[in-house]
Image (cartoon, rainbow, N blue to C red):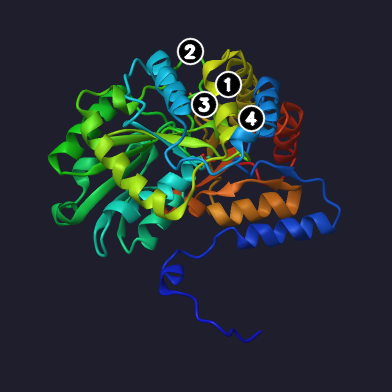
Amino acid sequence: MAQRFQLAHRLSKLPPYLFAEIDRLKREAIRRGMDIINLGVGDPDLPTPPHIVKRMQEASADARNHPYPSYEGMLSFRQAVADWYGKRFGVTLDPETEVLSLIGSKEGIGHIPLAFVDPGDVVLVPDPGYPVYQAGTIFAEGVPHYMPLTRERAFLPELRAIPSDVLKKAKMLFLNYPNNPTAAVAPRAFFDEAVAFAREHRLILCHDAAYSEIAFDGYLPDSLLGVEGAEEVAIEYHSLSKTYNMTGWRIGFAVGSREILAGLGRIKTNLDSGVFQAVQEAAIAALSGSQDCVEAMCAIYKERRDALVDGLSAIGFVVDRPKASFYVWIGVPQGHTSASFASALLSEIGIVMTPGTGFGRHGEGYIRAALTVDVSRIKEAVERIAASSLKP
Ligand SMILES: *Cc1c(COP(=O)(O)O)cnc(C)c1O
């Protein structure tokens, strides 16, 4: 079909959509009546805990919650975030100036470059990484500089390897631990190094902690804001999405440097009108209520993780047992690329996983499995792989 309108250049600067082939194969497999096991999507299969749903039902019936909310969030919501931060991380936040509500953390991640990045400014983004760091940068006419995350370096970027001419133009640094897609975690020493690096090079440090509450084996992820001086150069993103199975509700928050949050807030006052107050009320119930639901969820993910990691290791895959997140980052067998292996898994045995290259060039050699299906289906996926020609 001839196009009447020319798309803006910024859209053509985005990398090509790498999942188009997987989407096509998936439709094809479904058409053939294949039983698909979908380990592709980073969206929890578990429901939002009932006490949160109940609070939402009450709050949505209250007419006081029906007008436009404030863009920065109700003070009671920001107070609940500050209380949760204090309890969970031992970090003190001023709810008036150091907490900002977001319509999901993706919104705040995508918008922050608009506040601070001028055309040609460099933004340091992890590769592989959550695609929004790069997309937000490109929409602000910034230039992404990709920091490789490799297994040899435990999927932590080598900050000292960033060339000095790049650093001179750099304005912002994105980090994400526990990490999507590699499931890696960051030791406290790395956060110390990152904050020192951001201070030395006048970088805005944006840490995405969306998976901080999904952790196993007694490991408890730190807040980057626990590092002394971080509150001057850094913000941290959180989300109710993964912690309370609330991806569809659209609520997250950013905390930390009041100067950085004020910049992001300037963009938001001009573009959005905040989060439905009933959703904020439900989020208060989530953050301030019992956290037993989070513990129960982690136990479920742990069982799934072990089924997948044990099963794949037993048949010869290179796969680390993640301490956190609901992903497993799997080395593809020799003779395969990420894309060829993902395609073969789907078309031959009906298993969807995400090729590592969908998250950046350095994702080559890996595929990502999301632990968002029942453990019985995960075991079946392993059995299908074991019985196929796709094992290493
Ligand atoms: C899922 C996810 C988020 C959360 O997105 P929301 O917009 O809050 O639903 C943020 N960062 C990463 C890396 C994620 O995987």
Q: Amino acid at mark 3?
A: Arg
Which mark's residue is nearer the viewer, 2 or 1?
A: 1
Give the labeled residue for mark 3: 321
For residue 203, side relative to residue 381 (left or right): left
Crowd tier of the residue under label 2, counting other residues whose Cα lies within 10 Å: few below 14, some 14–19, many 20 or above:
few
For the residue pair 272 and 197, the one nearer the viewer reads as 272
Check if mark 3's residue and mark 2's residue have beta carbons within 8 Å: no
> Marks 3 and 2, how far apart in space?
14 Å
Q: Earlier in the sequence, mark 1 or mark 3?
A: 1
* As drawn, 353 above or below 14: above
Q: Amino acid at mark 2?
A: Gly
Q: Earlier in the sequence, mark 4 or mark 3?
A: 4
For the residue pair 266 and 253, the one nearer the viewer reads as 266
Residue shown at the point (60%, 38%) measured from the top left: 247
Give the labeled residue for mark 2: 218
> Marks 1 and 3, how far apart in space?
33 Å
Residue shown at the point (51%, 49%) measured from the top left: 356
Q: Earlier in the sequence, mark 2 or mark 4?
A: 2
Crowd tier of the residue under label 1, counting other residues whose Cα lies within 10 Å: few below 14, some 14–19, many 20 or above:
some
Residue 242 location (% of width, % of height): 56, 32
Judged from this view, the residue extending furthest toward the right is 33
Give the labeled residue for mark 4: 308
* As drawn, 47 above or below 11: above
> Marks 2 and 4, how far apart in space?
20 Å
